[in-house]
Amino acid sequence: MSTSSTEHLPSYLNPNDPGPWAVFLEQVDRVTPYLGEYAQWVDTLKHPERTLIVNIPVKMDDGRIEHFEGYRVQHNLSCGPGKGGVRFHQEVSLSETMALSAWMSIKTAVVGIPYGGAKGGVRIDPRNYSAAEMERITRRYMEEISKVIGVKQDIPGPDVNASAQTMAWMMDSYSKKVGEYSPGIVTGKPIELGGSLGRAESTGRGVFTIATEAARDANIAIEGARVCVQGFGNVGGIAGKLLHEAGAKVIAVQDHTGTIFNADGLDVPAVLAQVKATGGVAGSANCDTIENSEFWRLECEILIPAALAGQIHKDNAEHINAKLIVEGANGPTTPAADDILKKRNVRVVPDVLANAGGVTVSYFEWVQNLSSFYWSVEEVNQRLDDIMRAAYANLSATAEEHQVSLRTAAFIAACERILKANQLLGA
């Protein structure tokens, strides 16, 4: 981490272990030389506009009172209301939430939708709590953050361990608090409560769309292309399914239960059925089980990391045998790994573009809620494809102009848009 980044660490983060926020700061430092007149405003990006830490006291099923720590961070609202999911996970931290909110600022700017970046989370392992307890925790969290959110201020959505049901609880709690039906306060809701058709598949569909665009530029034919996917849920599973249907061969899938491999191509529908039935890919038929470390060494045309952050790092980047990496997860590649992959001419499509399908269709959902007019799934998918392809074309042109990676191009385009908005607002 650079000295300038250290200087911009908030006092409440540990300077010896600043976490994911330090990665974002390093990314901003790397792009600053390309920002021209907007570089003078760059420190704006290194300070979240608002950081809220809340205590969540909740009565458990057995009568005990437990306390949980929750966060809502609004990184930058110059381009519109805050947008970002809420995750429930035992490793949620303030640093992670800050970084994710900042990446949301970049992501929404990359695809050109009128949002700023925000993120929320509660530090909890949901596996240890009943559905009734999780509902009470969710509702109390929503009550605590209601002071800083609003339909045109900050709109939460689902993230890790948060479902359409979670969003329904949050919407109901907020609506009761403000005294009016407010479907636009969250996205990712059930269809029956104003959710958008196509939302559940949107992130994976966006990854697929970007993979096809990037493959064309890399002279990779999708028909017969070998694909490896880490994570096979709503993102990796949908992307893998669509690539399989387009004629690609998904040869390996890795998740928390292990890594499966078939050089001739996995039976993707069967693997998806296995995941639905058991929660993981382990035990899938007609495939071999290989060591998790071998996953990163497999020769393939397209690699899709769609699980957790930091999965591609300096210790495995040297061994990756993919021609193209399309990031379905948030922050799966460390800056050090980025440098290694660039030297090895491995093309990386960054998360802030590749997985932006989710927030794009969340925007569609919000627009439909505001207008009380709803679109068909065909309309949603077509609008999504149009936005994703246009964003990719724009980043490719920026990368070519500056002779930089697509990640750097994404940060150039996004930072310029955000900082120009800041400048125009006089903020």
Image (spheres, rainbow, N blue to C red):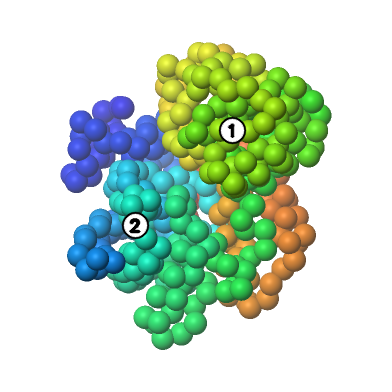
Percent across and percent down for residue 40 are 37, 42
SS category of the residue bearing label 2: loop
In percent of the image, x 21 and y 60: which residue is there? 67
x, y percentage for residue 360? 60, 55
Q: Earlier in the sequence, mark 1 or mark 2?
A: 2
Identify which amino acid the numbered label 2 is placed on.
Answer: Tyr
67 to 260, vertically: above or below: below
Would residue 11 appear left or right of 256 to someone viewing this image?
left
Q: Secondary structure at mark 1?
A: loop
The quadrant of the rendering that contains the N terminus is: top left
For label 2, count other residues whose C-alpha is less than 10 Å away and answer few (under 14), some (14-19) or many (20+): some
Q: Alpha-carbon distance for marks 1 and 2?
A: 27 Å
The kind of residue on which mark 1 rests is Gly
Question: Which residue, given by chain and number where applicable, does mark 2 sit on?
Answer: 129
Height in image: 103 above or below 55? Answer: above
Disc marking residue 283 = 1
Quadrant location, the C terminus: bottom left
Q: Tell me, for residue 64, which label it has, or none.
A: none
Residue 304 is at least partly visible in this image: no
Residue found at x 24% / y 33%: 17
**Residue 160 drawn at (x, y percent):** 45, 50
Q: Quadrant of residue 5?
A: top left
Left or right: residue 81 versus residue 367 is: left
Image depth: mark 1 or mark 2 in front:
1
Q: Is residue 388 above or below residue 68?
A: above
Of residues 408 and 55, the one nearer the viewer is 55
In the image, is 12 to the left or to the right of 21?
left
